[in-house]
Amino acid sequence: MSNEISLSRARPVLLAALAALVPAVLILAAGCTQEPTAPAYENPLDPDGPYQGDPFQVDAGYTDTGVLVSWNGLTLSGIAAYEVLHSLEADGPFTIAGSVEYPTKTYLHTEYASNQDNYYKVRAVDASGVGTAITPVQAALVPVPPYLEFGETETAASRKLDLFIRVDMGDSIELGATPDFELGLVHEFDDNGEVTVPWDLGAADSSGVMKRVYMRVFTGGAAGQTWEDSIEVDFDPQLTLKNGETFVASMNTLFEISGDGVTQMRFAADLRDLPSAPWLTGDAQYDGYLLDAAPDSQTVYGEFMCDFGFTRVDSALAVPDSLANIVLTINGGAESTPDLEFSMQTSVAASQMRFAESVAELASTAWQDYATTGYFAHSACVGDLVKTVHGQFRNDWFDPDPVSATIQWLPAEVLDVTIAVADTVTGGTPVQVTGTAVAGTCGDPLDAVEFNDGGGWIIADGLEAWSYDWTPPTVVEHTPLTLRARALAGAEADTVEVEVIVAPD
C-alpha cells in the first residue's frame, strides 16, 4: 500500500546548501538596482511546486516483526538523516517514531498500535537537527492486525499450541479456522488487552501445509476487520545414535530422536518390516532396540507419527567398533609426571576397559565401565621409574589384545632439610634454631636430624619439624659463624647450611 505525501517548504537551514542554485541579486552602481531574473531552481520540497511536494513517496507495510516504512531518497546536499513520524489519525498529531542516517531509506517501526490504522510520514533533517515541516497532506496508511504469537515458534510440529493475542483496542476476539468463523469461539481480553487461547490447528496430511487462523476483534459488541495469519506444519524428526555418533559398543545401544511433535514411534532393521513393528509412545530417546550380533554395519529405520495424522521415516547407521589401532595416551601425552595416579585416555566405542603394569597382571584385573578418560594408580617406587601401563578394551563384538604406553615418573619429593635462625644473634644468649625435613618419596624414612655449629654434630629434637636450643659463643667483636643441619634416612643424608653473625654481649 502506498499513499502520496508532501512536505511543506524546506526550512532555510536545510536548503542553505541549495543557495548556489539561485542567481544572486545584482547590485548596480549609484544605488540603482535591477530587477533580478526569476530563479530557474524549483524547490522539490514545496508542496505547491511542480514536484507536487512529494519526493519521498512514503510506503508502509505490515510484517511479522513490525511496520516497514520505506521512501524515496533525496539527492539534496545538507541532508544528514530522515525522521519517521507516526500517528493513529490521518490528520495527526504526528510524533517521531525514529530516525535513520542518510542515505538509509527504510525504517522498521515496532512500537505500532495493533488492531488500528497507523499513519506514517517522513521528513529530512540537516546536521543541526532542523527538519522540513510536517505537511497537512495525507500520510502513508497501514492497517495493523492484532498481535498474534504462535507459542514460541514460527512453525508447528503439533496441531495443539497456545495462541497469545494482544490488542490496543477492543474487549474480545473471535477465532476461527475458516473465514466464516464456523464453530468460532469468542475470548475476552484481560485489562492489558491480552489473552492466551489453547488452539487446535486441525489435521494435516504432510509438512509444508499452511494452517490458518482467522480473527476479528469486538469493541462494545461491534466486530472489526477480519484478519488472518498462518503457521507452517513442520514435522521432521531425525533419528541418530547417542550424541550423533556412528560407531557403537553395545547391541543395546541408545537412539536419540530430535524434533518436536512425536506422539508414536516404531523401529525395524528393514524398511519393509516397519508396518508390522509395534507402535511405542513417542520419546526423545529409545534404548529398547537390539542390534544384530554380526559385527557388520547396520541400518535402523524409525517411523514417527505426529498428531496431525501423518508419519515421517528416518534411519541411522550403526557400526560396531572393531577396536583396531587403539592409541593409549598417559596424562595427555606428557613425557613425565610426578603424580601417583596416571590419567589414561583413548577414544573408541568400547563398553569395558582395564589397566595394569604387566600383561600377566592385566589378565587378573577386574573390568570397569569404559570412559574416554580413566585413572590408574601405578606402583610408584617399585621397579623402574619409566612406567609402562597396559590397557585392554572390549565391546559386545570385539575383544582385542592389550595395548600399552609409557611415561617417566618423577618422584614428587627427595630427601631434604631446611634451617631457620635470625641473621644476627648475641653471644652467650640462648636462641632456638628450627627447621623441617622430609624423606624422599622412594627413599627410607627419616632417622634423625642433626645440628652443627662447628663443634660437631648433635641430635636435634623432632624430624619433620625439628628444633635445637643453641647458645652462641661469646665474642668480643662481630663474628660470622656457619650453622649446619642434616637429615638422615637410611644410607642417605641431606645437609643445609646458613651463615649468622654473632654479636658481642
Image (cartoon, rainbow, N blue to C red):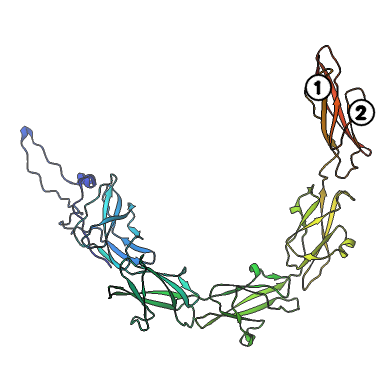
Which of 391/458 is in front? 458
Q: Position of residue 172 (x, y in %)?
A: 33, 73
Q: In the rendered image, is residue 194 in sight?
A: yes
The quadrant of the rendering that contains the C terminus is top right
Q: Secondary structure at mark 2?
A: strand
Which of 301/504 is in front? 504
Around disc 2, counting alpha carbons within 10 Å, would you say few (fewer than 14), some (14 to 19), or many (20 or more)?
few
Which quadrant of the figure has residue 442? top right
Tell me if 413 is positioned left or right of 225 in this view: right
Q: Any mark on residue 458, and which?
A: 2
For image coordinates 33% across by 62% down, the residue present is: 112
For image coordinates 33% across by 82% down, the residue present is: 180
In the image, residue 278 sits, relative to residue 490, either above or below, namely below
Q: Position of residue 222 (x, y in %)?
A: 27, 75
The quadrant of the rendering that contains the N terminus is bottom left
Which quadrant of the figure has residue 405? bottom right
Disc nearest the viewer among 1 and 2: 2
**Residue type for callout 1:** Val
Q: Secondary structure at mark 1?
A: strand
Which badge, 1 or 2, comes first in the chain's sequence?
2
Mark 1–mark 2 Cα distance, whole angstroms, equals 18 Å
Q: How many marks?
A: 2
Tell me if 501 is positioned left or right of 457 in this view: left
**Residue type for callout 2:** Ile
In the image, residue 305 sits, relative to residue 482, either above or below, namely below
Question: In the rendered image, which residue does mark 1 sit on?
Answer: 500
Tell me if 267 is positioned left or right of 227 in this view: right
Tell me if 364 is positioned left or right of 212 in this view: right
